[in-house]
Image: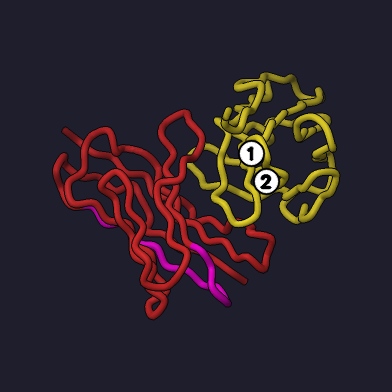
Chain colours: A red, B yellow
Amino acid sequence: GDSVTQMEGPVTLSEEAFLTINCTYTATGYPSLFWYVQYPGEGLQLLLKATKADDKGSNKGFEATYRKETTSFHLEKGSVQVSDSAVYFCALSRPDSNYQLIWGAGTKLIIKP
Amino acid sequence: NAGVMQNPRHLVRRRGQEARLRCSPMKGHSHVYWYRQLPEEGLKFMVYLQKENIIDESGMPKERFSAEFPKEGPSILRIQQVVRGDSAAYFCASFQDNTEAFFGQGTRLTVV
């Protein structure tokens, strides 16, 4: 079945460091890929998405590129801030499965000042 | 346009009581997902509903849990005879066809 694998956390970085959170997926067909962010005590918010191969999603300085050849959608940011501390979830959805979202386990990011 | 509204935000129930969680999707959305999140864990799919229909309930425990999404009104997740292991955050998300899913802020259920 379809699945999403994320790097385990927590990931701890200093402010202004470069961030990469790895995400790989297994799916048949042509899924859409998403990164969601969950701040403490809150629900999930869509951070960025990509709907086809080689698409790059970007938002708030975060980027991720849909790589079909490596089945990956790694999240990157050039210079993190303390306010980026949150849990990040990678997910996929397939149109032919009622757009059901398949989730990674989440990666907790801690940014130290 | 209000986002996805969940209520209550916090719910405390004694063991054996019923918990009723409500989710009002975004205007125009007719698809709702319910998820459960245990502390320090990811999201676990529970059920996918469209108006008046349960599409996929493969993630829902067979006993004590039920969900509905009536033609009018919010979607309801009902947990009967709650136990301590039901303590978790329950999130709902709504979407329409190939749009992104929008999440509510969740209901944090504590069973004492």
Compared across the picture, whether B44 is left or right of A4 comes to right
Amino acid under disc 2? Tyr
Mark 1–mark 2 CB contact (< 8 Å):
yes
Disc number for residue B33? 2
What residue do we see at 65% from left, 55% from top?
B97
Label 1 belongs to which residue?
B92
- Is any part of residue A14 visible from this angle? yes
Q: Residue at x 72, y 28 (%)?
A: B21
* Vertical side of B6 occupied by B53: above or below: below
Residue B110 x/y as whole percent = 64, 24
Establish whether labels 1 and 2 are both on one chain: yes
Percent position of residue B93, x then y: 62, 42
Task: Tell me the chain of label 2.
Answer: B
The span shown in magenta is A19-32
**Type of the residue with mark 1:** Cys
Circle 2 residues within 10 Å: few <14, some 14–19, many ≥20:
many
Q: Element type at marker 2?
A: strand
